[in-house]
Image (cartoon, rainbow, N blue to C red):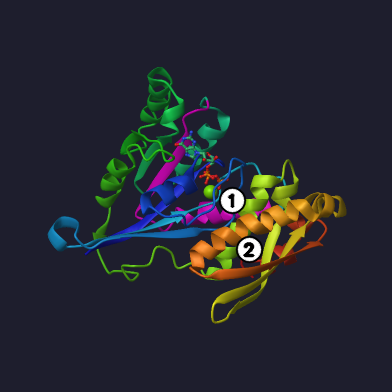
Amino acid sequence: MKSGFVGIIGRPNVGKSTFLNSILGEKIAITSSKPQTTRNRIKGIYTDLDYDDGEGLQIVFLDTPGIHIARNKLGNAINEIAINTYKGVDVILLINDGSKPFDKGDQALIDMLKETEVPKLVAINKMDRMGPEEYLVLYNKYEETGMFDDIYGVSALKGDNVYMLLDRLSGYMQEGPMYYPEDIATDDPLRFIVSEIIREKLLMTLNEEVPHGVYVEIELFEEKDNITDIGAVIYCEKKSHKAIIIGKGGRKLKGVGKAARLDIEELLGQKVFLSLWVKVKENWRDSERTLKSWGYKDE
Ligand SMILES: Nc1nc2c(ncn2[C@@H]2O[C@H](COP(=O)(O)OP(=O)(O)OP(=O)(O)O)[C@@H](O)[C@H]2O)c(=O)[nH]1
Ligand SMILES: [Mg+2]
C-alpha cells in the first residue's frame, strides 16, 4: 500500500476546503465566501484500494486555516495550526486564488515556504474565473521561484483538473500502512462536524465582524430511537452581536437553526431536534484561556 500526508496550505478564501471536498466527493469541511472560515486542522481521507492493480492508496489530506496577518490571538493561533501542519507531511499543496492578482501576501507565503524541504506543488484555483493571460502571469510567478515541482490550474468548485492533481499527489505517497479504514472520510468527531455546520450557516447569514467572533459549542448530543437531540450554544463577542444573531422576532436564529438542522439530519441519516442559544463572551478571541479551552491552542 502507498500512503502518506498532504498539507493543504494557502491564504484565506482561496478554496482549500472546497478542494478537499471536491477530492473526497463529499462535504467534510465547511466553506464560505468569507475569509477565515476554517479554524482547525481538518482531516480528509482518500482511499482507493484498486490503485495500481490492487496495491492500494491512502492519502490523508490536512486542510488548514488560511494564513493571514492576525489581528487577535485567535488569528495567531490559527496561523500556527496551518504553519505547524506543513512540517510533518510528505508533500505541500499550496493553493492560490487565481481570480485575484498576485500580491505581497502571496509573496510572503512563498517566502515562508522557502525554509521547508518538503516537496511542494501549486494549484492555481478558480480557473473558471480567469483568462489564459492571467493564468500565465501567475504561472510564471510561481515557476520563477524554482521551489515547486509542478503548477496546476484547477477549479475546485467545478472539479476541473482536480483528479489530475490527485494523480500527481499520489506519486508522493510511499510504501506504508493504511492509517484509516477504507470507508472513513474523516476522523473528526461528529460533535465537531455538527458545530461546524452551525458555524457555516452563521457565516452565510452574518456580515462583517459578527461571524468571525462566533464560536459554537455543542452542549447536548443525545441519540434516541428515531431522533437525535442536539443543543448548541453560539458564543459571540458583544451584546450588540447577540441581537444581530437572534434577529427581529428571532427570525435570523430560526433560519440558521433550520438550515443547520437539515444538513445535520442528512449527515446523521436521522431526524434531529436542534436547540440553539446565544451567549456573550466578551473579546474571547484575545483570551488565552478561552482559546486553550476551546482547542485552538495547546494547553
Ligand atoms: N469560482 C470559484 N469559486 C471557488 C472555487 N473554489 C472555491 N471557491 C469559492 O471560494 C470561497 C472560499 O472557499 P473555501 O473553500 O471556503 O476557501 P478556504 O481556502 O478554505 O478559506 P479559509 O478556510 O477561510 O482559509 C467559497 O465561496 C467557494 O465557493 C473555484 O474553483 N471557483
Ligand atoms: Mg477552509
Q: Does the segment drawn in magenta span residue 9?
A: no
- Rounded to the nearest whole Å, what is the CA distance between mark 2 and mark 1? 11 Å
134 above or below 256?
above
User: Badge 2, how many Cα within 10 Å: few under 14, some, many 20+?
Assistant: some
Please name the residue that numbered disc 2 is placed on: 297
In this view of the protein, which residue sits in the foreground, 235 or 11?
A: 235
Q: Earlier in the sequence, mark 2 or mark 1?
A: 1
Query: Label 1 sits on what residue type?
Result: Asn
Query: Label 2 sits on what residue type?
Result: Lys
In this view, the residue farthest toward the right is 239
Q: Is residue 164 visible?
A: yes
Q: Does the segment drawn in magenta span residue 77?
A: yes
Residue 263 falls in image quadrant:
bottom right
Q: In the figure, is residue 254 to the left or right of 147?
A: right
Q: Is mark 2 within 8 Å of ligand 1?
A: no
Q: In the figure, is residue 178 to the left or right of 286?
A: left
User: Badge 1, how many Cα within 10 Å: few under 14, some, many 20+?
Assistant: many
In this view of the protein, which residue sits in the foreground, 52 or 78?
A: 52
In this view, the residue farthest toward the left is 53
Under circle 2, the secondary element is loop
Numbered range of the magenta stretch: 74-100
13 above or below 277?
above
Q: Is mark 1 within 8 Å of ligand 1?
A: no
Q: Position of residue 76 (x, y in %)?
A: 65, 52
Q: Position of residue 98 (x, y in %)?
A: 46, 30
Under circle 1, the secondary element is helix
Numbered tag placed on residue 79 in the rendering = 1
In this view of the protein, which residue sits in the foreground, 173 or 159?
A: 159
What residue do we see at 80% from left, 55% from top? Answer: 250
